[in-house]
Image: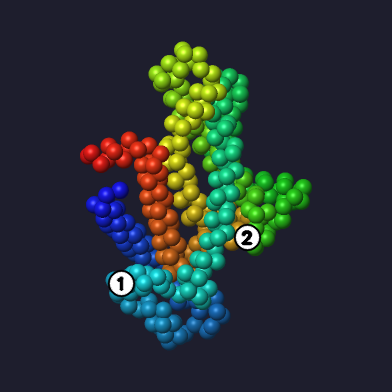
Amino acid sequence: MSIRGIVSRLLQVIITLIGVTFITFCLSYIAPGDPAMTVLETAEISVSQETLESTRHGMGLDRPFLVQYGSWLGQAVRGDLGQSYSAKKPVVDKMKEAAPATILLAFMSIAFMLVTAVPLGIITALKRNHWVDYLLRIVTFFAVSIPTFWTGLMLLYFFGLKLGWFTIGSSKASFEGAVLPALTLAFFMGGKYMRQMRLIVLEELEKEYVLGMRARGLSTTRIILHHVLPNTILPLITLLGMSIGWLLGGVAVVEIIFSWPGLGKMAINAIAMRDYPLIEGFVLWIALAYICLNFLVDLSYSWLDPRLSKEGHEK
C-alpha cells in the first residue's frame, strides 16, 4: 500500500471514529434519565436536590454538551476513557476484564462454524438437487430462522440441565463454559455460511476453466481441492471479517443467557445503569474492531491475489 493510500486510510479512520463517538455521545446526552440519580439510588444514598447537584457536578454532567464531548475526546486520545459510574473503576480496566471472554467466545464460535459449515456447503454444491442437498438446505433454513436465544435455551436445557455435561450459570470464562454459547452462535452463523459456500462453489463449477479441466479428464476431487477451493477464499475472508467484528462486539443475548462475562453483557448492564463512559468505550471498541478487520481483509486480498493490488496501483 502506498503512502498516499495509508494517509487516506488514516483520515477515514479518524473521521469514522469521531463520527461514531459523537453520535453515541449525542444519543446518551438526550436519553431519558439521570446517571447521577442512578448512581445515588444504587449506592442507597438519600437523594436530596443538593446531593444530586453535587453528584452531577462531580461527574461533569452539568457542563454543556460540546464541553463534555471535547473533554472526553481529549482524554480518549491519551488512552483515558474515563471512570465507569457503576464499576467505580477506569473504563479501560473494566473492558480489559470483559474482552478476553468475548474474544474466546468469538474464535471458538468461528472454529466450530468453519469445521462444519464450509465442508457441508461444498457438499450441498456437489450434490446439487440431491436429497442431501435438500436436507442440508432445510437445516440452513432453520439455522437462520431460529432466534439465538431459543437455540441457547434448548442447549442449556438438554446438555446442561438434563444431561449435566456442562456447568450452568458459571460467571467465569473457561473453555468448557464457552462450548454451549459457541455452538449456539456457530449454528446461527453456519446456516448463512453453508448457503454462501454453496452459491460460491456452484458459480465456480459453472465457469469455463472447470469445464475445460473436466474435458481433459481431471477428477472432481482434484478440481475442487486445487482450483475451486482457492478461488472461494476471498469471498470467505470477507464473510469472516464481518462475522468476527460482530462477535467481538459481544453477542449480548447469548452472553446474558449463558451468564458469559463478556463485552455484550457488560454493555447491556452499562445501558441499564446509564453508565455513559462505559457505553462510549464499548462503542469505540466496536468501531476499532471493524476498522482493523476491514484493513486486514484488504491486506489479505492483496496478498492472496496480487492482481488486485496491481490493478489498484495502476488506477
Determine which of the numbered discs, if any, sits on residue 173 in the image: 2
What separation in Å lies between label 1 and label 2 (alpha carbons)?
A: 36 Å
Q: Closest to the observer: 196 or 252?
A: 196
Quadrant of the rendered image containing residue 80: bottom left
- Which residue shows up at 45% across the image and 85% down it? 51
- Left or right of 314: which side holds 22? right
Residue identifier under label 1: 70
* Residue 138 appears in the picture as rendered: no
> Which residue appears farthest toward the left when viewing the image?
315
| Rendered-image quadrant of the C terminus | top left
- Mark 1 Cα within 10 Å, few/some/many (few <14, many 20+)? few
Q: Relative to 5, say whether 229 is above or below.
A: above
- Which residue shows up at 29% across the image and 38% down it? 310
- Which residue shows up at 75% across the image and 50% down it? 165
Q: Which mark lies nearer to you, 1 or 2?
A: 2
Q: Position of residue 136 (x, y in %)?
A: 59, 29
Label 2 residue SS: loop
Q: Position of residue 114 (x, y in %)?
A: 56, 40
- Left or right of 32: which side holds 217? right
- Mark 2 Cα within 10 Å, few/some/many (few <14, many 20+)? some
Label 1 residue SS: helix
Q: Position of residue 90 (x, y in %)?
A: 48, 74
Amino acid under disc 2: Ala
Q: Closest to the observer: 79 or 303?
A: 303
- The answer to whether the residue labelled 1 contacts the one labelled 2, judged by CB atoms less than 8 Å apart, is no
Q: How many marks?
A: 2
How was the colour assigned to the protein in this rendering?
rainbow
- Which residue shows up at 46% across the image and 17% down it? 213
- Left or right of 164: which side holds 220? left
* Residue 144 appears in the picture as rendered: yes
Determine which of the numbered discs, if any, sits on residue 242 in the image: none
